[in-house]
């Protein structure tokens, strides 16, 4: 089985606005309303939306209003909005580029979504410098996150979703265990480092069968587990799991495939924890007990590594947290003395084919400045700019009366994964197909020769990186049942890829 659960990311629901899975009628591009009068020598800048979020009805209305406001604010630029259904947006943009009819500005779009057009984005740093755009309003780590390996700064920070550890306060209390530390650099209550070894230890103590025995007990019944210690919540991508132990890339400096040692260690840690029953295997993840995938939200998992957008899924059907106040946030645990808060993020990019780079950057600056408060709320994104964050957390505090430790999420912005786990690879789609087959092996719960499987993965990726078709990387381990397919009605709303 090959799945892409890990590329389906949850959209935050802010201020009671539902994120609806609607598309533009017929999939055709939707133009912005009639433009305001402009001078005879005004230039037209086209803003292409659809590669990520932005095509839901309430988002369309907000973006159209922003276009009208921008056009009314000056007469040198006419901003046109093009909204294309996400299902066809990538092909539409590729066709436009090939035909020499590319838009100027695209977004919101994340790291992974931009890979299809890698190498076609404008370096924004010279334009920021010449226009006086203040890059110091962002954390330096967030700016550098968007810098290409070749040095170009092809995007600027906008909406961010740092990774954190969610934990179930009630389950820790019931087990008589101290909760995780509240800040990076702090040890666990017993003086041990807050690291992956401590998480493994706690996960076993917090895994409980129907008779109340934890996974360290000789009486533990692995066939009747009702509570698990740890889960990679909506993060089953092999690269995302690997980045629990730090950043890395499948692409070596010479362009060949490699397996980062820290990723291999992270996969082995996870496989071992599943084998010890401290984390659910795929059959258990897909069970009703764990809500067919939304495991932590059931209250039956003690710790989960995921992103800030997961606040979407610890709410009830009426979009509130009533009865679900069991959780809080903790730092990502350290591996070899270092913690990494892998980052999901959305931003805008200017295509290098634009004939009006200065005008395109003026529009980009408007979206990142004047229009940012409305857009960030519309997209449900944590602002990369510190001065815009208060309304975001005020909205969350209204939903979550227990007062989660938001600061630990903010602190994670200083330690993003560079290079990004969503970064580009040669023959990207073919490479992801190979990775999909490998990652399905990690959660089977069966005996797995990880060294042999990763050697096969590297060989397969090496062929793909060299331009060959994607080979088959292997099958489910002998004697295991394939993991169940993901129920269509449980897929979380998708944000930018």
Image: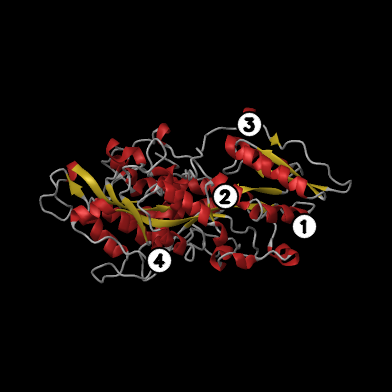
The x, y position of residue 304, in whole percent, is 34, 52
> Position of 369 compared to 488: left or right?
right
The residue that label 3 is drawn on is 27
| Between 265 and 461, the one nearer to me in the picture | 265
Q: Position of residue 71 (x, y in %)?
A: 76, 46
Look at the picture and state if 28 lies above or below 231. above
Classify mark 4: helix, strand or loop.
Answer: loop
Residue 76 spot, x, y in % from top left: 82, 50
Mark 3 vs 2, N-terminal side = 3
Q: Residue at x 74, y 53 (%)?
A: 360
| Mark 1 and mark 3: Cα distance apart in space | 31 Å
* Extreme-left residue of the structure: 219
Q: Which mark is residue 358?
A: 1
Q: Residue at x 60, y 63 (%)?
A: 147
Chain-order first, disc 1 or disc 3: 3
x and y percentages locating residue 67 in the rendered image? 71, 44
- Kind of element beneath mark 1: helix
Name the colour scheme: secondary structure
Q: Nearer the viewer, mark 4 or mark 1?
A: 1
Q: Earlier in the sequence, mark 4 or mark 2?
A: 4
What residue sits right under mark 2 in the picture? 376
User: Nearest the camera: 370 or 294?
Assistant: 370
């Amino acid at each position: 089985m090959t799945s892409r659960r890990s590329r389906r990311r949850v959209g935050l629901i802010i201020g009671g606005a539902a994120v609806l899975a609607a598309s533009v009628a017929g999939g055709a591009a939707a133009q912005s309303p009639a433009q305001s009068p402009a001078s005879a020598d005004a230039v037209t800048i086209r803003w292409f939306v659809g590669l990520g979020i932005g095509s839901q009805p309430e988002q369309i209305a907000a973006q159209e209003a922003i276009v009208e406001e921008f056009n009314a604010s000056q007469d040198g630029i006419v901003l046109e909005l093009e909204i294309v259904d996400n299902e066809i947006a990538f092909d539409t943009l590729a066709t436009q580029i090939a035909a020499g009819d590319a838009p100027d500005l695209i977004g919101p779009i994340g790291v992974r979504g931009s890979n299809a057009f890698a190498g076609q984005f404008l370096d924004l740093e010279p334009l920021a410098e010449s226009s006086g755009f203040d890059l110091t309003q962002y954390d330096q780590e967030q700016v550098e996150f968007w810098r290409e390996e070749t040095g170009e700064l092809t995007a600027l920070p906008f909406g961010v979703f740092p990774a954190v550890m969610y934990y179930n306060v009630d389950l820790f209390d019931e087990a008589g265990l101290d909760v995780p530390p509240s800040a990076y650099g702090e040890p666990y209550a017993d003086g041990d480092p807050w690291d992956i070894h401590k998480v493994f230890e706690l996960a076993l103590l917090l895994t409980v069968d129907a008779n109340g025995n934890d996974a360290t007990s000789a009486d533990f019944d692995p066939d009747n587990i009702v509570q698990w210690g740890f889960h990679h919540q909506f993060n089953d991508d092999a690269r995302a799991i690997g980045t629990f132990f730090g950043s890395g890339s499948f692409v070596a400096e010479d362009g060949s495939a490699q397996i980062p040692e820290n990723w291999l260690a992270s996969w082995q840690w996870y496989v071992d924890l599943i084998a010890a029953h401290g984390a659910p295997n795929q059959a258990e993840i897909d069970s009703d007990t764990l809500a067919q995938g939304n495991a932590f939200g059931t209250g039956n998992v003690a710790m989960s590594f995921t992103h800030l957008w997961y606040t979407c899924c610890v709410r009830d059907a009426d979009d509130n947290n009533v009865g679900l106040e069991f959780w809080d946030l903790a730092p990502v645990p350290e591996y070899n003395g270092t913690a990494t808060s892998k980052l999901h993020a959305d931003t805008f990019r200017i295509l290098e084919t634009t004939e009006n780079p200065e005008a395109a950057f003026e529009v980009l600056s408007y979206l990142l400045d004047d229009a940012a408060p409305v857009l960030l709320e519309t997209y449900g994104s944590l602002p990369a700019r510190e001065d815009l964050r208060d309304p975001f957390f005020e909205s969350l505090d209204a939903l979550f009366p227990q007062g989660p430790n938001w600061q630990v999420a903010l602190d994670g912005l200083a330690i993003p994964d560079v290079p990004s786990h969503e970064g580009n690879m040669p023959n990207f789609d073919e490479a992801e197909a190979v990775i999909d087959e490998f990652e399905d092996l990690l959660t089977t719960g069966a005996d797995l020769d990880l060294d042999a499987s990763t050697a096969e993965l590297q060989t397969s990726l090496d062929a793909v990186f060299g331009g060959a078709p994607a080979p088959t990387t292997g099958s489910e381990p002998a004697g295991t049942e394939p993991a169940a397919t993901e129920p269509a009605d449980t897929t979380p709303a998708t944000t930018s890829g």
